[in-house]
Amino acid sequence: MLPTILPPLTFAEAIETTKVFSVVGMLEKDQALITRRPFRSPHHTISDAGLIGGGHFPRPGEVSLAHHGVLFLDELPEFKKHVLEVLRQPLEDMKVTISRAASALTYPASFMLVAAMNPCPCGYLGDPKHACRCTYPQIHRYRSKISGPLLDRIDIHMEVPAVPYQHLLQDAQAEPSAEIRRRVSRARDLQTQRFARSRIFCNAQMGSRHIRTHCRIDDACRRLLEAAIDKLGLSARAFNRVLKIARTIADLQGAADIGVAHVSEAIQYRSLDRSGRVTP
């Protein structure tokens, strides 16, 4: 699971996460502190109040219960569109404000959003061994449930092809999660040092000011990004996210500066970011 390769919770993160679970009454008996990053996977029938928080007596929703952890949304287009749209604010601000007539409550919501979806309703669009049975209007309706502004706020888009049968039978050992976690932790340590004098602690939290300071690129990288913006129709928000991903790739490799290879790889992770993103 993804949480097994994420760096351990710091004490400050554990305190914040524990506060959220305590408000909801979800701390286990005799549990004084949350020590593992949360992993939340709500069903696609969830309401906007269940996802974001609210109710007659406002309480945190799934985005706050995933604070400093992972929020996994499987079958993303199956969620109601208005429910998905309320994710835009917490993805941008990393917090949720619930307003009522007499008061307003703010809950933390700094989480990693991971979502999965099929390429089309039948799931076979682009599959070399199965013919897609969907019509263009069906594919358009299916993909249009995910709005452009929401896609802009998702850093990485990856197409995952079907795994061939012979690969499933291979005995080759994959890289252990513990080794990946050590590599991720080293990169996070670099980021902690980088932002020691800031109120943030990782690349994902960088704003425009931090990007200008810590994501400097040379002329070759600028030309590559210019070509990507013209060809792929990247928005200003997607442009900033490409730079943050490139900075993270460089950190994972222990590189002090962002290079062309890092920017190129980051651009490849925006597969849904096209001018006509809902076309088959």
Image (cartoon, rainbow, N blue to C red):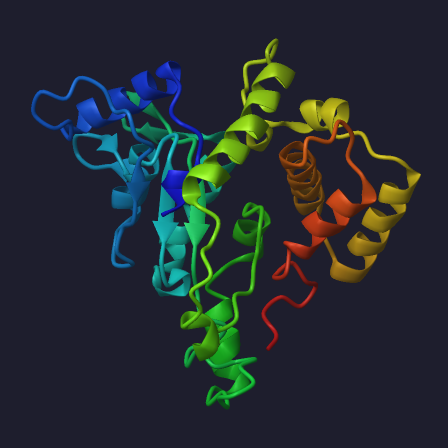
- In-front residue for pair 76/4: 4
Q: Residue at x 74, y 43 (%)?
A: 262
Q: Is residue 193 above or below residue 82?
A: above
Left or right of 204? Residue 12 is: left
Q: Is residue 44 above or below residue 251?
A: below
Q: Residue furthest left?
A: 29
Q: Residue at x 18, y 29 (%)?
A: 24
Q: Is residue 163 visible?
A: no
**Image location (x, y in percent) of residue 72:** 36, 49
Q: Is residue 227 visible?
A: yes
Q: Residue at x 44, y 69 (%)?
A: 170
Location of the C terminus (image quadrant): bottom right
**Image location (x, y in percent) of residue 10:** 40, 19
Q: Residue furthest front?
A: 171
**Image location (x, y in percent) of residue 208:** 69, 28
Left or right of 88? Residue 62 is: left
Q: Quadrant of residue 87?
A: top left
- In-front residue for pair 252/218: 252
Q: Residue furthest right?
A: 219
Q: Is residue 60 above or below residue 142?
A: above
Q: Quadrant of residue 250?
A: top right
Total labels: the figure holds 0
- In-front residue for pair 169/225: 169
Left or right of 57? Residue 228 is: right
Q: Residue at x 19, y 23 (%)?
A: 23
**Image location (x, y in percent) of residue 177:** 42, 43
- In-front residue for pair 143/131: 131
